[in-house]
Structures are given as C-alpha cells and as structure tokens.
Image (cartoon, helix red, strand yellow):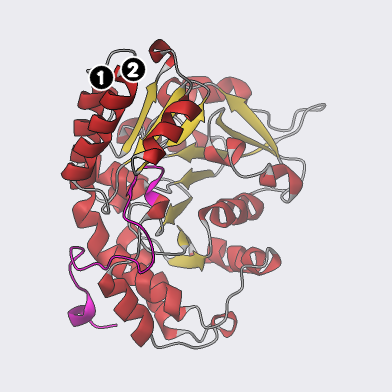
Amino acid sequence: MTAAKVQSLEDRPVAPGVAAAIDLRSDTVTKPTAAMRRAMFEAEVGDDVYGEDPTVNRLQARAAEIFGREAALFVPTGSMGNLVAIKTWTQPGHEVICDNGAHINQYELSAMSYVAGCLPRTVAAPDGLLTWGLIEPLLQIKHPHKADTGLIALENTHNVAGGSVYPTAQLEEICDRAHTAGLPVHLDGARIFNAAAHLGKGVAEITRKCDSVMFCLSKGLGAPVGSMLVGSSEFMQKAHRHRKTFGGGMRQAGVLAAAGLVALEESPKGLKRDHENARCLAEGLAQIPGITLDPKTVVTNIVRFEVAGTGHTAADICAELKKRGILAGPFAKHAIRMVTHYDVDRTGIEAALAALREILGR
C-alpha cells in the first residue's frame, strides 16, 4: 500500500443499515474508515502461514520499526497476543506477577492457567500501576516448595483503573530490577498509543525496556481486526509457533493487515482529541448530582464513574441511556465506563451529558 492511499480519518462512512447511535461502550466499536476499507479492497495478499502475504509482512515490519524492535507478529486479538507472550516466556507451573485488575487476570478467561499452565500472582496496585516495592515481595525464584516466578506483566494504559498511564521512570525501574533478577517483562500495551499521546513521547521510548509488547490495532487506532506483538527475533520465532498452536495461523490475512497499516500510520494523530473529549465528558459528569468522579484522574480516553449516589444502578442508567441513543457499559453494580474514540465528537459528548442530566433529574 503506497502512502498516497492513506487518507484522513475524517473520510469515514456511515455503516449501511445501522442506526446512528453515540456508542461510548468501548473504543473497540469504531468503524473502519473509508481509507481502511479501500486499503482492504486493494490489498495484495498471499498465504501468511507460508509467510507469503506481502501486506502482513509490511505491517509486521512497520510495527517493529515504530517500536524499535527486531520483529513483530500480527495476531487476531490482543488476548491471543498476551497469551502467546506468556506461553513464550514461561513454563507450565510458573507464576505471572500482575496487578489484580490486569486484563490478563480479569478478562481473558483464565487463559494463562487454562492454556499456558501458569498461575497469576496478583497484588492490588494504586491506579493499577505496579511498583517494584509491590512486586519484590511476590518474587519466588528456586524456592523449594513454591512455584517459580516466570514473568512480570504490566498494563499501560490500565483498563480497569480508567486509562491510567505508567510514568516512564516507574516502568523502567521495574524492567531494570526484573532483568537483574533474571525475569522478563511483558507489556499489555493494548492502548499504548494512548499512553504515548498523554506523555508526549513515542511508543518506542516508553516501552524500550520491556521484553515484549502487545498492542491493539482494533481499539483507539480503529482497525476492524487485529493486534501486534513486538520483540526480539528470537522471541518472535517461538511466538510464531505458539500463535499457530493457538489457532492463530491465518491465510490471506492481508485484507485485515491493510486496515492495520492505515490505522498504524494515521490514527495516533487523533488520540489527543479523544483524550480532550474524555476530559470534557468527565468534567460534565462531575457536575451531575449523585455521580462521583474526579476529572483530574481522567488522562486518556477511559472515563469510569460511580453512580451509587444517584439511587440507581449502573444497569438501570445504561438502559435509560440506550433508549435515548446513548450506549454505555455498566462496569459494576454502581459503576459505569464510557470510552471516547474517533467516532464520537464533542457534539456526541454533550448529547450524552444531556441525556444523563435528564435521566437523573427526573
């Protein structure tokens, strides 16, 4: 795909047959842009299991280049990317240290245990952001009675914690100390480009000391399908085999990779706007009686707020919002999550706030 085929994110279609709605459930609901659809239609393809799909190969090479790594691997989902990394770094019976609210612990169907044979060793971290002081007491290396620590897994941005971002120095201290202990560090960077946009740094700079990084093309970057795993050539040779084991070998996958290339080149430019919209949403929510939220904690595109003070459950409020064309996700009995993305503009944010004021003001 040539650079001339990469079009603006503003050039995007309205999906046929789909009623217009303001969808704040997740940034996974984004529709592929017109540029992505054109790239998919025109994609040069081959058999990726044989390593012969030129568009997949370009996507992998470009991802590796952007992250300053030797190699990259295209995987169907972020969950598979995380699982492939865990399986590559560990042996059955190992423990994986992670935050209690980590996506790999809470939302990946216990795959690290069920498939990779590893046990999560968790600790509650403020804002989901681990420190070496929290990690060190959990380490077990060649203990005569306990499972060995095999991997440390971090998440940046942190989903459950509302899109929190690791300070680079904090993340790098964990990596340095882990390496001294002989342990690898995997980063679940599903929304790492959001973290980079918040910090004003490149993704290569803020992930350089992690041994492997997974990031999603299908969240804030807006591609319809796919995630990437980046790391060393040696790591990727093993990871490639594990992807095949888990059923992730794809054939003419260039039709998907083509959209990923557009997303990788174009979508990061719009993430700051998503963050601004999230902050606008948070500030408006904080002014509604009964809603508990500190707007200062909203630094990327995820807004999580408590509604216990309204006298309603999150599910009831979301059901009322849906009647008004606003989609949001109940995150707990009295918590709601809203996520901004490029398909929701400032007008949509104001409409969501107006709907909430109406529902809670009755």
Q: Earlier in the sequence, mark 2 or mark 1?
A: 1
Q: CA distance from mark 2 to mark 1?
A: 6 Å
The C terminus is located in which quarter?
top left
Q: Indicate whether 77 appears above or below 44.
A: above
Is 89 positioned to the left or the right of 264 in the image?
A: right
Q: Which mark is residue 89?
A: none
Q: Can you name the residue that lies furthest to the right here? A: 145
Q: Helix or strand or loop: what does disc 1 sit on?
A: helix
Q: Which residue is mark 1?
A: 286
Q: Is residue 173 visible?
A: no
Q: Position of residue 179 (x, y in %)?
A: 51, 40
Q: Amino acid at mark 2?
A: Ile
Does residue 7 sit above or below 78 in this rendering?
Answer: below
Q: Position of residue 131 (x, y in %)?
A: 45, 25
The residue where tag 2 is placed is: 291
Q: Is residue 9 magenta?
A: yes
Image quarter (top left, top right, bottom left or bottom right) of the N terminus: bottom left
Instruction: Give, as a single range, the part of the protein colored magenta.
Output: 1-27
Q: What residue is rendered at 40% in x and 45% in y? A: 26
- Crowdedness of circle 2 by 10 Å Cα count: few (<14), some, many (20+)? some
Task: Check residue 155 for magenta coloring.
Answer: no
Whether residue 286 sits left or right of residue 102 in the image: it is left
Do residues under tags 2 and 1 come within 8 Å of each other at their CB atoms? yes
Crowding at dot 1, Cα within 10 Å, few <14 / some 14-19 / many 20+, comes out as some
Left or right: 118, with 256 as reference point: right
Q: Amino acid at mark 1?
A: Ala
User: Which residue lies at the image location 45% right of the left edge and 24% below the top edge?
Assistant: 335
